[in-house]
């Protein structure tokens, strides 16, 4: 059984807020099957961009995507805009929490 993207986004927002972080949806995608892009930050300091992609075994994996330098905000913004233009069903969510990548990895094991 595949979980709907909207359900997964809601779950991630709740988990982030439950541990004292902040989550906001920057772009809404397809409720059922949209790809999820997470922009991580810690107290406003940019972290990695993580994308949930379909794995060969039919499951999902989280991959670091986009520019290598998280401080290059213009490149990150351009990357997000290009991804959104190429895939209008893409969800983009920002997490502002200490070690957001770890939270995403833990959340990913639930899905």
Image (tube, rainbow, N blue to C red):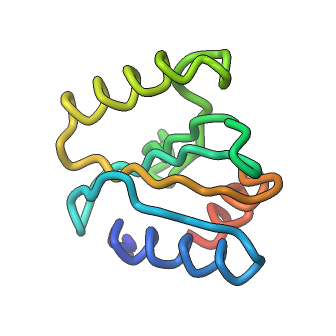
Quarter-of-image position of residue 65:
top right
Query: Where residue 44 sits in the image (x, y, percent)?
Result: 69, 46
Q: Residue at x 17, y 42 (%)?
A: 88
**Which quadrant of the rendered structure holds the N terminus?**
bottom left
Quadrant of the rendering where the C terminus is positioned: bottom right
Quarter location, residue 95: bottom right
Q: Nearer the viewer, residue 60 or 102?
A: 102
Please provide percent x and percent y for residue 98. Answer: 82, 56
Q: Looking at the image, which is closer to me, 70 or 63?
A: 70
Quarter of the image for residue 6 reads: bottom left
Q: Farthest residue to the front: give it.
A: 44
Residue drawn 35% across and 66% down? 5
Q: Is residue 29 left or right of residue 67?
A: left
Residue at coordinates 24% horizontally, 56% vertically from top-left? 29
Q: Position of residue 15 (x, y in %)?
A: 65, 78
Residue 103 located left or right of residue 3: right
Which residue: 40% across, 49% down? 92
In front of the other: 80 or 108: 80
Measured as percent of width and height from the top left, residue 31 is found at: 23, 68
The answer to whether 45 is drawn above or below residue 100 in the figure is above
């Amino acid at each position: 059984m595949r979980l709907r993207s909207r359900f997964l986004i809601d779950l991630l927002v709740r988990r982030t807020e439950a541990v004292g972080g902040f989550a906001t949806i920057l772009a809404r995608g397809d409720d059922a099957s949209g790809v999820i892009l997470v922009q991580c930050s810690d107290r406003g300091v940019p972290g990695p961009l993580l994308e949930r992609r379909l794995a060969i075994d039919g499951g999902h994996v989280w991959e670091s995507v986009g520019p290598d330098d998280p401080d290059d905000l213009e490149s990150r913004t351009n990357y997000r805009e290009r991804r959104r233009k190429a895939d209008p069903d893409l969800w983009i969510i920002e997490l502002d929490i200490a070690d957001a990548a770890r939270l995403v990895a833990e959340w990913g094991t639930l899905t």
